[in-house]
Image (cartoon, grey):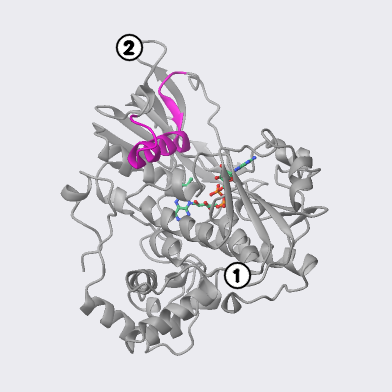
Amino acid sequence: MGKYRSVSERIGDFDSVEVRLSPEDLHADLTRCQDCGIPFCHASGCALMNAIPEINAQALAGRWSMALATLLDASPFPEFTARVCPGLCEGSCVQGLYGEPVQCRQVEKEVIERGFAKGLVQPRIPTRRLGMSVGVVGSGPAGLAAAWRLNQAGLNVTVYERDARPGGFLRYGIPDFKLEKEVVDRRVEMLAIEGIAFECGVDAGVDLSGRLLKNRHGIILLACGARRRRDLDIPGRGLAGIVFATEYLSSVNRVVSGETDSLPAALDPRGKQVVVIGGGDTGSDCIGCSWRLGARSVTQLEILPEPPAVRAESNPWPEWPRVRRDSSSHEEGGERRWSTTTLEFLPDGKDHERVGALRAAKVEWVPGDAGPRPVALPGTDVDMSADMVLLALGFTGPEDNPILGSLGVSRTANGGIAADKEGRAARNVYIAGDARTGPGLVVRAIADGLNSAGVLLGDHVNCRNYSLAEG
Ligand SMILES: Cc1cc2nc3c(=O)[nH]c(=O)nc-3n(C[C@H](O)[C@H](O)[C@H](O)COP(=O)(O)OP(=O)(O)OC[C@H]3O[C@@H](n4cnc5c(N)ncnc54)[C@H](O)[C@@H]3O)c2cc1C
């Protein structure tokens, strides 16, 4: 079963790596889904509670438009999750107990893309307007989902985005080979036709004060992400050539989409020995981009130990399987080192201002009061050549964002945004997505955007349970 285009072909471009399931594979998987006794995929797995067993049964029966309607009942943007979701549903698929799970994400892609191809996914312009206005700050998946729901309920919605174009990490984080930007454009265009106004290039709190926004809209929903990057405070950190992964990925995305012409020299991996520090999605995306842009070598360092190939006994089904995953980018080459910490960055032999190498060591995880902590093992130090280092160490929470103070929103002691458990952060100010939950996944950001919009509707319009199907 070929899931991706061949490595030799795909590293020559930024097009989607994934190939469509063959009709035979699709039929086989949809049939396997019907053998399920009690499905866990939709409730225990999917954050949006997509009715996966029904969708798959309808698709197997050839009722694709019905499958589309069922999918859209729970999920406003299945074309995003169908491309980038790690497949939480597949982690709890009953077939996965003894073999390969049903490829639910690929089925989702088939359903939504057939819908678009047949012209069945059309803008739904609300027929009533309630005369109430909401300003949404941030246009990532959470902001878009909240805006969609509020607009469908008849509120007037304006989305403010400080970047040049809407999408958040969908546009400026995740590379095109996982999520083509035409897919983001297609949805944003539809949202605009449905009546949502987008004001891009506006840094809320800087270009527009919170008071002005409140005067304009009365109600504000903040979906500004969790973008405070974790840094590595070790000797040599100030050397040139050490950059944050998100800075690199956003520049690459801008070049691929034609928003800018070329990468700044400091972010161009061509001919360089690239070391990516951090083993998550962001790190993996850096690997794929670096190969496509002509890196000489790519090495990824991860401080955690290599996960097992199969579930440990302490991680039973239907929990999310904590097993080793190799992304399409990992298949493209390079080395991965586990249980490895970086001790210091070393200058280049000729240009002492630039990084030329890093010193790494193996770690052992030892129990501590605040949980296991890594301890470098003596005698395991190695120096590795590195002309470009990408820091993909994750995020520690929402950034310092002037819009927060400007709206009277306070921070928690651990750097989060203070809000009640339903996302009310101040009077008539709501919060959604990674900004509320911490760094997460696209599917969770969409679900949280819908939920926060539901809380807002319950407070102001008394229609909290407004169902997606009623739109
Ligand atoms: C490189 C990378 C790869 C990823 N890959 C995956 C993946 O494969 N699968 C997956 O499920 N998840 C992935 N994620 C995680 C996922 O992208 C995030 O969890 C999700 O985008 C969070 O959505 P959000 O809407 O809460 O925030 P964001 O997407 O971060 O959007 C926040 C938006 O708010 C805007 N903003 C902030 N402050 C202001 C302001 N003051 N005024 C105006 N605008 C403002 C920002 O510019 C941004 O556009 C990835 C993340 C990264 C960084």
Is residue 280 shown to the viewer in this render? no
Q: Quadrant of the N terminus?
A: bottom left
Which span is picked out in magenta? 239-262
For label 1, the SS is: loop
In this picture, residue 327 sits left or right of residue 79:
left
Badge 2 or badge 1: first in the primary sequence: 1
Q: Which mark is residue 371?
A: none
Where does residue 320 sit, x and y in percent of width and height? Answer: 49, 66
In this picture, residue 385 sits left or right of residue 133:
left
Q: Quadrant of residue 338?
A: top left
Nearest to the observer: residue 354 or residue 324: 354
Q: Quadrant of residue 381?
A: top left
Report the amino acid beneath label 2: Gly
| In the depicted structure, whether residue 110 falls above or below residue 366 | below
Label 1 CB, ligand 1: below 8 Å? no
Q: Which mark is residue 126?
A: 1
For label 2, the residue is 349
Q: What is the crowding at mark 2: few (fewer than 14 residues within 10 Å), some, or many (at least 20)?
A: few
Image point (34%, 26%), residue name: 386
